[in-house]
Amino acid sequence: PSLLSTFEFIRARRRILKLPSPKPSARAIYHAWLQLRRYPQPNRDKPLAIELGNLTIHAQNWLELDYLFNEVFIGNEYLVKLPRRDPFIIDCGANIGCATLYFKLHYPDARILAFEPNPYCFEMLKQNVQANNLKNVALVQAACASAEGTTTFHVNPGFSPMSSAIGNRDEKQKTVPIEVRLVKLSDSIHEDVDLLKLDIEGGEWEVFADLVASGKLARIHRMAIEYHHRYGTTEVKMSRFLKILEDAGYTYSLGVDIKADRRFMGVFQDVMIYAVKLGMEEKAA
């Protein structure tokens, strides 16, 4: 390997071994990351599995798992301090279940309700839940929206995180349109929700329309929302989305990562919104 790649490897290793609140452990996450780094190039478009401590993570291909593993387990995108050992968590846009596994590692007694409309991801989600013997995890094969019914879902066959009901996010690769079921998230909320994880590729407006109309937004204590700014539109309306949170009594933090050469282009970007009910903020360490 070149000197630069060796340096990058050492830097990545150091970063992983110093992760905050690692579960199952920093060393287990590092060894899982090593499995991905060393996975044979010719097999990277085939289904695979890696070991994470005592868990096994199954995926449709290497690219998807590498992306999701880095986002969830190394990026700690869903790290949150919840006030009880058996929280109720909703994973909306569960994909193959990396976030669900992450929540179970941090809160083994958590009750999780996971929604995923992509039938190929849903099968991997079921496999990951069953293979790891996860308890109190309910799975729903559907997309969340403002009304029940069906819709066209655009499946990206090579990289499922870019699949969406809104349209084709990946211009370099054709998507496959399929019909999926729509459900109202509000119909599944009958108690307070400790955490809502929402990553549904532009569908967050539909979900919020339902939560506001039903009055169920008030029952959600914390949210980790991946907001898709300017997704499928040139309209700029993020301030309106944040205003919904403000009017409902939430405070929030924003996580934005955009390349320097794209800062003034007015292009699509992912924005993480970490919202919490006023009065429920985490205390400083």
Image (spheres, rainbow, N blue to C red):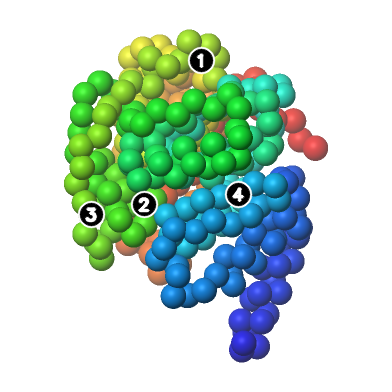
Nearest the eye: 23 or 169: 23
Q: Estimate the spatial distance between the alpha carbons at disc 1 and disc 2, rounded to whole Å.
A: 30 Å
Task: Name the residue carrying label 2.
Answer: 160
Q: Amino acid at mark 3?
A: Thr
Task: Name the residue carrying label 3.
Answer: 175
| In the displayed structure image, the side of residue 194 where residue 168 appears, left or right | left
Circle 3 Cα neighbour tier, 10 Å, few/some/many (<14 / 14–19 / ≥20): many
Q: Is residue 166 above or below residue 219?
A: below
Q: Estimate the spatial distance between the alpha carbons at disc 3 and disc 2, rounded to whole Å.
A: 10 Å
Residue occupying the point 71% across, 22% down: 84
Question: Foreground mark, 3 or 1?
Answer: 3
Q: Is residue 243 visible?
A: no
Nearest the eye: 180 or 228: 180
Q: Position of residue 43 (x, y in %)?
A: 45, 70
Answer with the quarter of the image where residue 274 lies: top right
Q: Estimate the spatial distance between the alpha carbons at disc 3 and disc 1, rounded to whole Å.
A: 36 Å
N-terminal of the pair, mark 2 or mark 4, is: 4
